[in-house]
Image (spheres, rainbow, N blue to C red):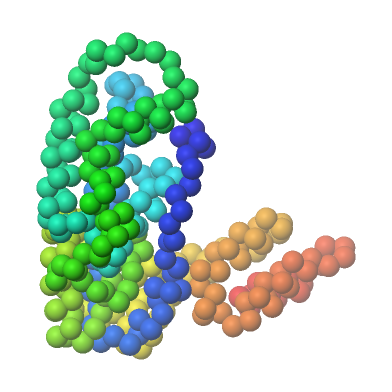
Amino acid sequence: MVNAVTAIMEYAMPLVDDLLTDMEMYLLYRSLDAASGFWAVMMTQRAWKISAFVRPLGHFEWLRLPFGLKNAPMIYQRMIDNALWGFVQPRGGWSSFAERVRKAEAVDTAIGGSPTDTAIHSRTRFEADRESSDTPDSLSAVVNDPRGDMFSSGEADQSSLVPGFERRSFVDDICFGESFDAYLETLDRLLSRFEECQISVSFTKIMFVQPTVDFLSHAMSREGLRADEKKLKAITELPFPRTIKGVQAFLGALNYYSRFIQDIAVYGAALYDFGPGGDLSTAKRSFAAL
């Protein structure tokens, strides 16, 4: 219900093909997976109420961004992009901004469950939106502060700590690779920025100084890109589709690895050729070829 009435956030998500371009040019790779993912993003008091849910044990509210909300991937992607690229910089630096956010979260947590003297009354959605914008909570005030970033202040942050990474990440899958010296230099800048932005990394999923690494269901190495063997095995075990919907599902599964399949469009079109009288010979040959 919440997703049905939520306006979609306009933020460009990275394209997988763009992220994989020229990855074979690097000598060494590392893969860092952000721990807890969306839970690193704090919610405003109004968002607590909107995303609340009821379970047999009682009524619960999310204090951190939960999985499943329509705009969660875009919000998190923007946060990661800001951390890696620094094109939306808090005035005064990330450390100062993080401290203001922590103080705001403490204030919101302290007063979030306390009773209010305001009489309870029904409000329309528009009245609630207007009231929320007129009286923002502590976290909203920090986020919407005119000092927040270069777009609202009109001044770019000149901090020497702003890293200029060459690539974007995809949500919380982050991967970079270069020569060994550049590798260590970029790793140091990356971890320093994560510390500033309070972004944790999953220790069990870290891979350092690897000649090959898995990234977005692709195996990357100096020799080039390869499709993930487990995903390929699952695709090859799919049964022959006998309906239009089944054909669409099969081609959808293949589309992710279309860069490795020559003439996929030609074979895909032949799958729809069921022929008069239910002749499936052409479609089966195309299926076998794919």
- Picture quadrant of residue 246: bottom right
Instruction: Give the residue at x 61% y 59%.
Output: 249
Q: Residue at x 42, y 47 (%)?
A: 71
Q: Position of residue 185 (x, y in %)?
A: 14, 79
In the depicted structure, whether residue 71 falls above or below residue 111: below
As drawn, the residue found furthest toward the right would be 276
Residue 60: x and y in percent read 30, 27
Q: Along the horizontal axis of the image, is 51 left or right of 164? A: right
Task: Judge whether 62 appears above or below 174 on screen.
Answer: above
In the foreground, 207 or 163: 163
Residue 94 x, y percent position in the rendering: 16, 57
Closer to us: 262 or 5: 5
**Residue 220: quadrant of the picture:** bottom left
Count up the numbered dots: 0
Residue 231 appears in which quarter of the rendering?
Answer: bottom left
Q: Position of residue 199 (x, y in %)?
A: 19, 56
Please state if 255 lies on the left or on the right of 24 as rendered.
right
Judge whether residue 231 can be spotted in this image.
yes
| Side of 229 where 191 appears, left or right | left
On screen, residue 222 above or below 93: below
> In the image, what residue occupies the spot 18% across and 80% down?
183
Seen at 22% across and 26% down, the residue is 112
The answer to whether residue 52 of the structure is visible from this angle is no
- Image quadrant occupied by the C terminus: bottom right
